[in-house]
Amino acid sequence: MMKNHSPIFHNKGFTLIELIVAAFIVGLVVLSVVATIRKSRETDITYFHHHNARAIIDSCFESVKYSYSQFDSIPSVSGASFILDPRNGNSLMGTLNISVTVDSVPAEGSIYVVFKKCSATLSWSEPEGTENETITKSVPKLL
């Protein structure tokens, strides 16, 4: 008996449709990994900017101008510029605004504690939109 050696029965390769489907699936996986890495990088940069903004505001509040010994002359700030990210030669600038309001809360008996509420906001522009960081500090008036 003679066996049939037709090339149809011995073809062990992939069809064109199978190759196209496999390439499509691999492409989707690669695109999703790239998108995840890119979003992670954007999130990391935004966190870095928020961290720097908090450090700038903290350094302003730690200055003598915002201490209880300077209660009567605590300044408001409007539109001061700060560098949030000096990397890569493209400095990301932020705008600082500090508002100061006088408030009081009742203490023991008929005594009121007077304090100044200093609210600092540093704003900047990210590719996703405007971001800001706000920190509030209360400075008591010494009697």
Image: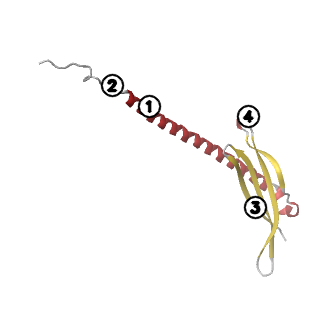
Q: Mark 4 highlights which residue?
A: 89
Along the viewing direction, whichever of 34 and 107 lies nearer the viewer = 34
Q: Which label's residue is closer to the chain start, 1 or 3?
A: 1
Which quarter of the figure is the C terminus placed in?
A: bottom right
Circle 2: element type: loop
Residue 141 higher or lower than 59, as above or below: below
Q: Determine whether label 4 and label 2 are within 8 Å by CB.
A: no
Which quarter of the figure is the N terminus placed in?
A: top left
Colouring style: secondary structure
Q: Determine whether label 1 and label 4 are within 8 Å by CB.
A: no
Q: Mark 3 highlights which residue?
A: 137
Q: Which label's residue is closer to the chain start, 1 or 2?
A: 2
At label 2, the amino acid type is Gly
At label 4, the amino acid type is Gly
Q: Residues within 10 Å of mark 2 (few under 14, many from 20)?
A: few
In this rendering, position of residue 60 left or right of residue 50: right
Q: Mark 2 highlights which residue?
A: 13
Q: CA distance from mark 1 to mark 4?
A: 40 Å
**Residue 80 position in % (x across, y down):** 82, 49
Circle 4: element type: helix
Q: Mark 1 highlights which residue?
A: 23
The answer to whether one can see residue 67 in this image is: no
Residue mark closest to the camera, 1 vs 3 = 1
Q: Which label's residue is closer to the chain start, 4 or 2?
A: 2
Q: CA distance from mark 1 to mark 3?
A: 57 Å
